[in-house]
Amino acid sequence: MDRPSRRNVLVAGGTLGAVGALGAASPAQAAALWTWSPKGSVAGAGEGADPRGVWDPEADRLVASLLDRGEVPKVNRLLRTWTKNGQPLPAGLPADLRDFMERARRLPSWADRGKLATAVDFNEKRGLYLGVTYGFASGMMSTVIPREARAVYYSKGGADMRDRITKTAKLGYDIGTSNAYRPDGEMVVTCVKTRLAHAGVRHLLPRSAHWSKVADERVPISQADMMVTWHSLPTTVMQNLVKWKVPIPAAESEAFLHSWQVAAHMLGIRDEYIPRSWEEANAQAKQVLDPILAPTPEGIKLADMLLNLGSTIDGGILSKPILGSLTRYVLGDEIADWLKIRRDPLWDPVFETAWEPFIAVREGLLSLEKAPGALQKAYWAFDEILRLGALLVLSEGDLPISIEIPVTNNPN
Ligand code: HEM
């Protein structure tokens, strides 16, 4: 698969995971003191400033200036041709942007090629589980992350959710490819373009009357917001794989973390906020992610859309109640109730009793005959859920995906 398109990105299972980078709105953000120490970061040191008051000043100034100079449409057009990590930047870019991008595309000095190669093994071996966890742990969790949803809802992407999900899916797809960070891969390009898109959002959203009415911050997408979304992805995924007792060698677990640490850096997150270990990641997530989860009208709508994805894509094999029960199982009763997911007397107990044995059977740790009776009946459905990523095919066909700097907010 050489050119990611709507179709093959979705088939690769990135779609639902990508929704992990979408969010939902809620009135309250907890305002506890920032106490996480930069000693636990990949940098090992730092000022320790509260990331809720830190954005991405260099990118933000640059993109604001490009927008003010009316150069963004031209830049977007030129950048459509820039797709591979090792490819030279296209001719004709404004000099200040070129200069920034040349620096922004460099991997951090601490990027470890060996670990990135091990991450590839992990992604290949665990691709099926990653689709489900990105989708029904990260994706569903994102519907109860307030600030991101407001940003998404009132920015340009909010006007076309499907397009946005597809574009965001590209990042989930790219990070799992075998050449993700290598010169012939696309993850660096995707991250740098996303960093620019976020900078555009920071300039534009404060000008949206709709957003300003509901927002609880002056400028969106702070470093803290970035970490919240980051934790809804790798941290949450790994927590679930561990909970489900998927056997993962320590080196692969560390490598998966590393591939996301590099992604965080490339997205403009400061090294002093990027956790250096799973232990630190879990501690930081407790501080930034757990307390801010809350229901909102937008999140409820988004969750409903996700639950319908299964049944619209595979012709109803996986009906909404099954995916609803999966969500309840993965995220717990409180979040499922927030999202107005109905309790299902048939499937809720099946997940409780049979999901972990199902994983054990798939992993060759338990024979199906010895598994609980509920699993004999549910095996087909569970297997379908794992394959959902491979069933996701959107109708628009094989258009190439290009992440762009927005020039407007959602007009609606
Ligand atoms: C755009 C990923 C954090 C809000 C994007 C895009 C990607 C992405 C791939 C490009 C897709 C597109 O153009 O539609 C991520 C990742 C994050 C993250 C991996 C963290 C690790 C956040 C946060 C917010 C946010 C914290 C808000 C609080 C947005 C918005 C857009 C966007 C509003 C632009 C949509 C438009 O074009 O209007 N993000 N994001 N993102 N992201 Fe993020």
Image (tube, helix red, strand yellow):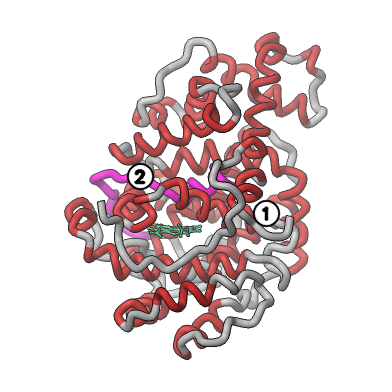
Our reading of the magenta stretch's main secondary structure is loop
Which label number is shown at residue 176?
Answer: 1
Residue corresponding to mark 2? 24
Q: Amino acid at mark 2?
A: Ala
Q: Nearer the viewer, residue 146 or 288?
A: 146
Question: Outermost residue toward the bottom?
Answer: 95
- Residue 387 x, y percent position in the rendering: 67, 33
Magenta range: 13-34
Q: Is residue 368 above or below residue 127?
A: above
With 114 as the anchor, is 139 left or right in this view? left
Residue that appears at 39% across and 70% down: 199
Residue 76 falls inside the magenta stretch:
no
- In the image, is the residue at mark 2 within 8 Å of ligand 1 by its beta carbon? no
With 77 as the anchor, is 287 left or right in this view? left
Mark 1 Cα shell of 10 Å, populated few (<14), some (14-19), many (≥20): many
SS for dot 2: loop
Q: Is residue 232 visible?
A: no
